């Protein structure tokens, strides 16, 4: 069964794509939930316009993410934390703390979910935290944790 996707589906395709799916999956899951529509000649023209608008939006989002990346790469973010013995922090520095510090110091708003830490920062020093603003835009932010 050929269908046109109305939204992005992981493992199937993106909005506006014309894909071939099994009859049961199309009839019982995609069509009743409004996630796809049956492919016809007129519908494929509509799908082309959906793909064009998706591409334009994606290009604008990527350009905005690259601008943010250029402004953040060169400026380290400083976070002051309470320190105990052996330069270890009381508690830890989390992605929420880093996002708040970036907003306060640079004026750029970053969601904590865009920051990727394997585990919270628990020591004083300079740390590189990867930020993923867009599917194709990923860069490190320098975070300096100092005793306070």
Image (tube, rainbow, N blue to C red):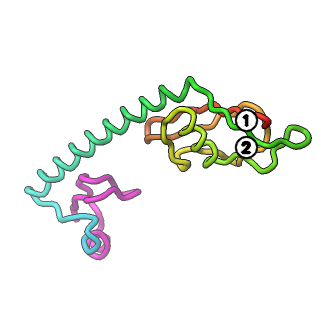
Q: Earlier in the sequence, mark 1 or mark 2?
A: 2
Q: Is the residue under label 2 in contact with that under label 1 (CB below 8 Å)? A: yes
Location of residue 28 with respect to 142 vertically, above or below: below
Left or right: 17 in relation to 125: left
- The picture places residue 28, in percent across and down from the top left corner, at 29, 76
Toward which corner of the image does residue 58 lie, by quadrant?
top left
Toward which corner of the image does residue 4 lie, by quadrant?
bottom left
- Magenta-colored span: 1-30
Q: Residue furthest left?
A: 42
Few, some or many residues within 10 Å of mark 2 (<14, 14–19, 20+): some
Tell me what residue is drawn at x 18 percent, y 65 percent: 38
- The picture places residue 54, in percent across and down from the top left corner, at 26, 45
Query: For the C terminus, which image quadrant?
Result: top right
Residue under numbered circle 2: 121
- The picture places residue 71, in percent across and down from the top left corner, at 49, 27
Q: Which mark is residue 145?
A: 1
Toward which corner of the image does residue 29 lie, by quadrant?
bottom left
In the rendered image, residue 6 lying in the magenta stretch gets the answer: yes
């Amino acid at each position: 069964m050929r269908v046109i996707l109305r939204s992005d589906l992981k493992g199937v395709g993106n909005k506006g794509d014309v894909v071939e799916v099994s009859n049961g999956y199309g009839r019982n899951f995609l069509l009743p939930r409004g996630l796809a529509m049956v492919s016809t000649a007129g519908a494929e023209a509509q799908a082309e316009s959906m793909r064009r608008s998706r591409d334009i939006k994606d290009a604008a989002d990527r350009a905005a993410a690259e601008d943010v990346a250029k402004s953040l790469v060169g400026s380290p973010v400083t976070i002051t934390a309470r320190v105990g013995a052996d330069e270890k922090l009381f508690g830890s520095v989390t992605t929420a703390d880093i996002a708040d510090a970036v907003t306060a110091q640079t004026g750029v708003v970053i969601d904590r979910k865009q920051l990727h830490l394997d585990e919270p920062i628990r020591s004083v020093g300079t740390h590189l935290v990867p930020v993923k603003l867009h599917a194709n835009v990923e860069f490190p932010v320098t975070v300096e944790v100092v005793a306070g």
